[in-house]
Image: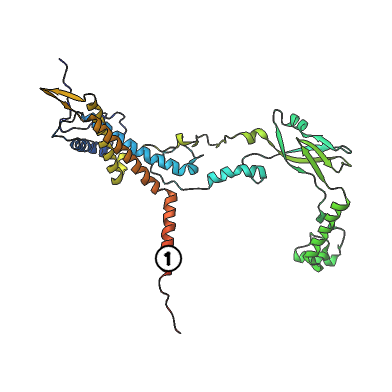
Amino acid sequence: MAEEIAIWPGSSSFAEGVTPFGFYDSETTFQTDADKVANWCATKMGYPIVDVELQDVHFYAAFEEAVNEFSHQVNQFNIRENMLNLQGAATGSNLQGKEITPTMARVVSLAENYGSEAGSGGNVTWRTGSISMTNGIQDYDLNAWAATNEPGEQIEIKKIFHEGTPAMTRYFDPFIGTGMGSHGLLNQFGWGNFSPATSFMMMPMYADILRVQAIEFNDMIRKSGFSFQLINNQLKIFPIPTQNFTLHFRYIRKSERANPVQDTGNGLGVVSDYSNVPFQRMQYTFINDVGKQWIWQYAASMVKKTLGEIRQKYNSIPIPGNEMNLNGDQLVQEARGELEKLVEEIRDNLDASSRRNQLEKQKDEAEFLQGQLMRVPLKIYVG
């Protein structure tokens, strides 16, 4: 004869290790509430008027799953809400219960790519190179230079230093106005290192600017401009060099720009995506009353679903002269609807508390308040 399986006797006594995972078994609050939730769920299922074909482990499993689901929904929301701020941060610490303050770090990090191209910063190193210019030779192959100086690397030239002598240095002739009297006076004004001396004292600033501009226009119109043409790292210098000199340039390695993986330098893992944001499971003890109420309702619906699935196995039970139909299908259908409604409810509440919605709410409140204040009669003062 088969052994009779015991069902819910009307009470239970929780002990560590009876839940499937044991995530919260060591928390005193969870231990106290476990038996209360079991009794509450059994009462909602009709006990003691009707038997509840469950054991205490079913109630405990439903309770643990409800806490897991609450933690999952809240953590999921927090990850979505803060992903931009957390990406790239260290994964070594638990973010549960921590305030996440928005920063500009990730936005700046994304903008560094533009800085790398513009030469104003970024995460790609601009390197320095030089090549010897030969009198009478205009064309130079920088790929050949790279094969020798950057073996195995492709380079991209970012800046070439090939310019004429600045007009300002040709305008201020050091051999003009070197009289001892003028220099003695200029030293008192702090201009002793500049020349010509009298230009700073007798001429307005715009006159200097106009003279420099005249020199530059003269160079541009009457002389061969200092320029270059760079196509596929083939360099053509203008004008044709008339003497030997060294030309300097700046370049990057294409492999460094193409590498999307950034080394943090601290030897720690960093948040890369949704899967490794370090939000750990919540502690049941620190969940507030609103959260615990949701957990209890979710646990009751899970118990109803489990009971319905058990009763579905025996849709009808024969009795003398008739048969008795069980309500397994109805319980499962009701439980699924309740669970979907609870998940939808918590998601709506979390979305309503998002940073964006809160800021919009504050904006609306400020506008409404301003509208009210505008309707307050202004006092008229008579002097």
Instruction: Give the image quarter of residue 59.
Output: top left
Most extreme residue toward the top is: 1
Which SS class for mark 1? helix
In the image, taking residue 85 as reference, residue 129 lies left or right, namely right
In the image, taking residue 373 as reference, residue 1 lies left or right, namely left
- x, y (%) of residue 144? 77, 30
Image point (21%, 25%), residue name: 315
Q: Nearer the viewer, residue 377 or 9?
A: 377
- x, y (%) of residue 15? 23, 31
Q: Nearer the viewer, residue 288 or 298?
A: 298
- x, y (%) of residue 303? 25, 33
In the image, taking residue 142 as reference, residue 315 lies left or right, namely left
Vertical placement of residue 137 versus 359, above or below: above
Tell me which amino acid carries mark 1.
Answer: Gly
Image point (44%, 44%), residue name: 81
Instruction: Give the image quarter of residue 198.
Output: bottom right
Q: Determine which residue is flagged by label 1.
A: 371
In this orientation, does residue 33 appear?
A: yes
